[in-house]
Image: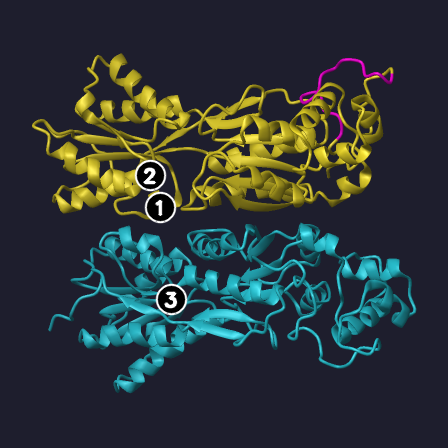
Chain colours: A yellow, B cyan
Amino acid sequence: MISDRKAFGYTPDMTSTEQSPTGDSAPLTLNQIAELAGVSAATVSKVVNGRAEVGPETRALVEGLIAEHGYRRRRRRIKAARHIEVVFHELAGDYPTEIVKGVQRVAWTHGLSVVTSELGGRHTPRQRWIEDVLSRRPTGVITAFSAPSDEQRVQLATLGVPLVVLDPAGNPGLGVPSVGATNWSGGLEATRHLLELGHRRIAMITGPAYALSSRARLDGYRAALDAAGVPVDPDLIYQGEFQIEDGVVYTRRLMALPEPPTAIFTANDGQAIGVYHAARELRLRIPDDLSVIGFDDMPSSHWILPPLTTIRQPLTEMGATAAEMLISLATGEHLHQKRVELGTDLVVRESTAALLK
Amino acid sequence: MISDRKAFGYTPDMTSTEQSPTGDSAPLTLNQIAELAGVSAATVSKVVNGRAEVGPETRALVEGLIAEHGYRRRRRRIKAARHIEVVFHELAGDYPTEIVKGVQRVAWTHGLSVVTSELGGRHTPRQRWIEDVLSRRPTGVITAFSAPSDEQRVQLATLGVPLVVLDPAGNPGLGVPSVGATNWSGGLEATRHLLELGHRRIAMITGPAYALSSRARLDGYRAALDAAGVPVDPDLIYQGEFQIEDGVVYTRRLMALPEPPTAIFTANDGQAIGVYHAARELRLRIPDDLSVIGFDDMPSSHWILPPLTTIRQPLTEMGATAAEMLISLATGEHLHQKRVELGTDLVVRESTAALLK
C-alpha cells in the first residue's frame, strides 16, 4: 500500500535540496508560500489546483517557490487520490490494452484503480487536458506515446502529481522519468534474423520520423546490414505511419522494383498485416515467396495466418514498470534510474523462411 | 453544452413526483434532508458522497428521502464533473475501443472527457468500485457488458449520478436505461445468409449463457432454421466463452462428426478466427470447404484472410447513443425510450460461399 502520509510529499526528484527559509528542508505550507510570494493564500491555492485565473507572472513566482522548496499539501487531498491516470495519444488497436494490463497488475497490488483517457490522436495534450486530469485527482499520470508540454510538466510538478512517460514519441523532456524498449537492438535483431536466413534484398517499412522508436528501429536495421557488409539501398526503405495501409501501399511499390526485396521488415505488426494483404493481391506466398517480420508481438501476430515472426516489445512489462516508478515517486522514494529500456525479443513463427537459391 | 444548473438535479426518472414537504416539488437541500431524517448534515453528506461509515438503517432512511423528494446538490460539486466514466468488464481486444470511440464523439461535443476503467473480468463491480468512481466525480457512468448490483444502482441514484447500461450481460435491472443491438435479428440474418447459399448442416458456436446477447443470437439461429424447415441438431451447437480458443476447439469436434457441418456461425469474430485456425490445421479451405460467418464486425474481420463475412454490431453507435442518453439524464431531460436496440447488418465478405453439390 502507498503510505498516504508520504503521497504527494516532497520528493527529491522534483525539488531542489536547498534549505528552505524556515530553517530546514521541509516543504512549505500553502500559507508559507503565500507569505514568501507576497500574494494571498487563495492565489496560491489557485496555482496549486491548476486553475486558470492567475496572471502568468504570479503563477511563475509561486511555481518557482514550490520548485525550490517543495509544497506540503494538506491531507484532505491526498485521501482522494486512488487511481493512476494513463493517457494515450489514441485508444485504438491492442497497444493501449497491452499497456493497461501491466499498469493494472501493479496498481491493484497497491489498492489503486486505473483510468485511461485519450488525446484524440494528438501527441501533446491540449491545455484543458491538465485541468480535466487534475479534477480527477490522480495519484500519478503515465502518458503513452505522447508527452505533456514543458508548461504542463511544470504544472503537474507544482501540484505534486508525479509523471512517467511511456514509449516517448519525442524527447520526453529533461529529467522526466520514462520507460521504453530497446528499439535499436530490436531493429538489429529483426534484420539479422533475415540475414541469417540468406536474405540480402531486405526492405524496411518504418514508422513516422517524430517517433524516436521508429527512428531507433530503422537505425538498428541499417546497422545490421552494414555489419554484414550489405549496402543500405534507399529504394528499399519506406516511411509510414504505423498503419496497416502502409504495408499494403509500400509492398506494392517494393515488389514493382526491377530488383524487388525477398524479405520485408515492418516497424509494427499492423504494417506487417498490410504486407500480407498486398502479398495475397500479388499472389505471393508468405514465407515461400516473401519473408515478413513485424515488431511488437501484438495478439494479432499469434493468430494471423501464417503466424507472424516478430520482435516482442514488452508493452505489458513496460506498463508495470512505469506504474512502479510512478508509485515510487508518489511515495517520495528516490528513483534509481530515470530512463528505463526493457529488452526486446525475437519471436520466430511462420512468416520467415530461408531464401531459396 | 450541458447546463450546469441542471446537472445532477432532480430528474423525473430517478425520483417520484410527489409533493415535497416544503410545499413544492423542488428537490431538497442537504440540510432539509438532515432535518427530515433527524440526523446531522454531516451524516447526510457522508451518504451522498458514497462514504462507508454510516449505519445501514440511517443510510436507507436518507436514501429513501432522496428517492422520494430529490436532492439539490450544491453547485461546487457540479462544476467538478467533466467526464463520462465508461466501465468495462475487461479491457481486451477491440470491443472497448469501438465503444469508447462513440462515447467520445458525443462527450467531446459537450465539452466532456471520457475515462475508462475495468473490472478485471468481473461482470458485477466490487463495492469499492463505486467509491473509486465517485471520488472522480463523473457526470455519469456507462457500464459495458457488466452492470452494477441493485445496491450500487441505488447508491448512484442517491448521488445523482446517472447510469446507462450498454450491451447488458444479464438483466440490467428494472427501469435502468440500456443500449443494446438487435442480437436476435442478427442471429437470424446470419443463418438465413447461409441457408440462402444452400447450406443445411449449419453449426453454431455461441457465447456464454449468462450473456443475453449470446442467448438472443442462438435463438435467432434456431428461428431461421425452423422457418426454413431445417431441423435444429443439438450436435451442431457448442457453447463457448466468446474466445478465439472456442473456435479452435469446437471446430475440431464439429468436423469430426459423422456428418460434419458445411458452415459455421460464431457468436463473435474472435471465435471465427479460431475456426480459421482449426480449418488450416485440418487442411480445409475457407470458403471452398467450409463457410464461416462471425458477429460484431471488429476491425480484425476486415483484414483477416480471407476477409470475414459477419454481422455488424454497431458498437460505436451504441457508445454514442449511451452517451447521449447519459447526458440527457444529467441535464434532467426525460428519456423517450429507456431500452434502445440498434440494428445489426449483414456484411458479406469472402468467408462464405454457395454449397457445392
Q: Considering the numbered disc 3 on the image, is that residue within a helix, a strand or a loop?
A: loop
Amino acid on which the number 2 mark rests in the picture? Asp
What residue is rendered at 29% in x and 38% in y?
A: A271
What residue is rendered at 57% in x and 35% in y?
A: A142
Q: In which quarter of the image is the C terminus of chain A?
A: top left
Q: In this view, does A6 lie above or below B34?
A: above
Furthest-left residue in this view:
A258
Answer whether residue A14 is magenta in the image: yes
Label number found at residue B267: 3
One can see residue A100 in this view: yes
Q: In which quarter of the image is residue B150?
A: bottom right
Does A51 sit left or right of B147 as displayed? Answer: right
Q: Are the two marked residues, 1 and 2, in contact with CB atoms closer than 8 angstroms?
A: yes
Does A241 sit left or right of B146 as displayed? Answer: left
Find disc 2 in the rendering and name its residue. Answer: A269
Q: Position of residue A38 (x, y in %)?
A: 81, 24
Both on one chain, marks 1 and 2? yes
What residue is rendered at 17% in x and 35% in y?
A: A290
